[in-house]
Amino acid sequence: MEQSSVVEKEVPAAFVSFKSRYGAAAAVHIEQGVNPTEWVTEPAPEPNDVHWPFFSASFLKRWICKIIVFIACIVLTVLFLIPVVIVQGLTNLDQLETWFPFLSSLLSITFVSEVITGYLPSLILQLFQRIVPPIMMMLSSVQGHNALSQIQKSACFKFLLFTIWNVFFANVLSGSALYQVNVFLEPKEIPLVLAEAVPSQASFFIAYVVTSGWTSTASELFRLFPLISIFMKKKFAGKDDDDFEVPSVPYHGQIPKIALFGLLGVTYFFLAPLILPFLLVYYCLGYIVFCNQLLNVYAPKFETGGTFWPIVHGSMIFSLVLMHIIAIGIFGLKELPLASIFCVPLPFLTLLFHDYCQKRFLPIFKAYPAEHSVGHAVFGKERPRRSE
């Protein structure tokens, strides 16, 4: 339908086909003219992966949309600090009694205090966090991408950064937003601050793994919300079974959560080893559940080409570097200077390994290789052409 609407019309974009994959690869990687703003070329997505609203958008429009989305993400991150502060208030029983003195008699009951300070904070944080992936998907869809896979990858990266900052760092530092920023403006104090703050939140993150990891993985089998949505559509919209659309894998919502639990496992395995059995149960349960979902429930709408793997790799490198920094701070607090000195080279060696992987393996994820290319098309923009 989109192609038929632009037939015999002048549009500033077109799909250009080539007889060989080498010709398409050469057209993508070389400039098409002296003026770099006249032609903008990029590998064409597969037919089911095209995002038509930005098919003929100009470079300036896409650039402005990226700036607007960047500002919106910052605003969303700052606003999400409100539920994080509430959650941290619930984890501190003394602070909770100060805020609500009339609950002192109720909080004196052991069972009630354990539920409120143990499971309720992580449950509230999980409920607020469920609304973030659709928002990130919506923001990425107006960012100017031409492929649905690019939109999902962008939403995944945004949600990962959002999750690491608001779920991990904001809860660990558990202070005002200004204090959290000032910590990272003083690099020398980062290891000591993290060494003091991270161990104190071990019990909270263990409860978070149980409430968020176990329950979300188990609920993935039932898919209760999609079931209710389908029932409501059939009941009120009058849609029959022929209109049922097979769901696709929600990479943008699942990958950041898995990466966050990997971050918790790497940073807490020597501070609070008790978290490891809970993470092991989560990953084993997730493996069983998603094997079933990928085989019997989800159907891929487009081929991603493994582009989500660099995000996972980058998150693990970040987790290792953060673990090394925390270890340096822990050994410094325990007055073990020799252990701290031996830990200092570890972050640099990890970053050196990451740089090697970036230069050696990352190019294969940016574009299909010419030897095994799936398509032979290039997406050209800016210069008006008649589509045929």
Image: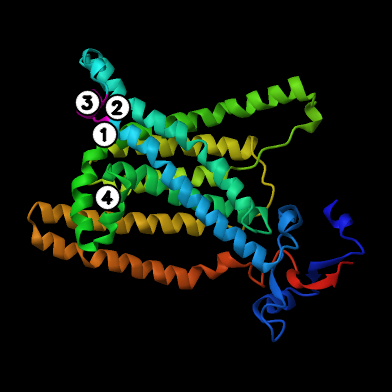
Task: Tell me the distance, in whole angstroms, between the alpha carbons under discs 4 and 1.
Answer: 23 Å
Q: Quadrant of the C terminus?
A: bottom right
Mark 3 nearby-residue class (10 Å; few <14, some 14–19, many ≥20): few
Whether residues under marks 2 and 1 lie with C-beta atoms below 8 angstroms apart, the answer is yes
Q: Nearer the viewer, mark 4 or mark 1?
A: 4
The one of 282 and 68 positioned closer to us in this rendering? 68
Task: Indicate which disc, 2 or 4, sits on the residue closer to the N terminus.
Answer: 2
Give the image quarter of residue 117: top left
Mark 2 nearby-residue class (10 Å; few <14, some 14–19, many ≥20): many
Instruction: Say which amino acid is labelled 1.
Output: Ser
Which stretch appears magenta? 90-99
Residue in the picture at 41% in, 71% down: 356
Task: Indicate which disc, 4 or 1, sits on the residue closer to the N terminus.
Answer: 4
Task: Indicate which disc, 3 or 4, sits on the residue closer to the N terminus.
Answer: 3
Count of all numbered marks drawn on residues in the image: 4
The image position of residue 236, as x and y in percent, is: 75, 21
* Helix, strand or loop for disc 2: helix
The mark found on residue 179 in the picture is: 4
Residue in the picture at 73% in, 54% down: 53
Q: Which residue is mark 3?
A: 98
* Helix, strand or loop for disc 3: helix
The mark found on residue 126 in the picture is: none
Instruction: Say which amino acid is labelled 4.
Output: Tyr
Task: Tell me the distance, in whole angstroms, between the alpha carbons under discs 2 and 4.
Answer: 25 Å
Q: Does 315 appear in magenta?
A: no
Task: Tell me the distance, in whole angstroms, between the alpha carbons under discs 3 and 4.
Answer: 22 Å
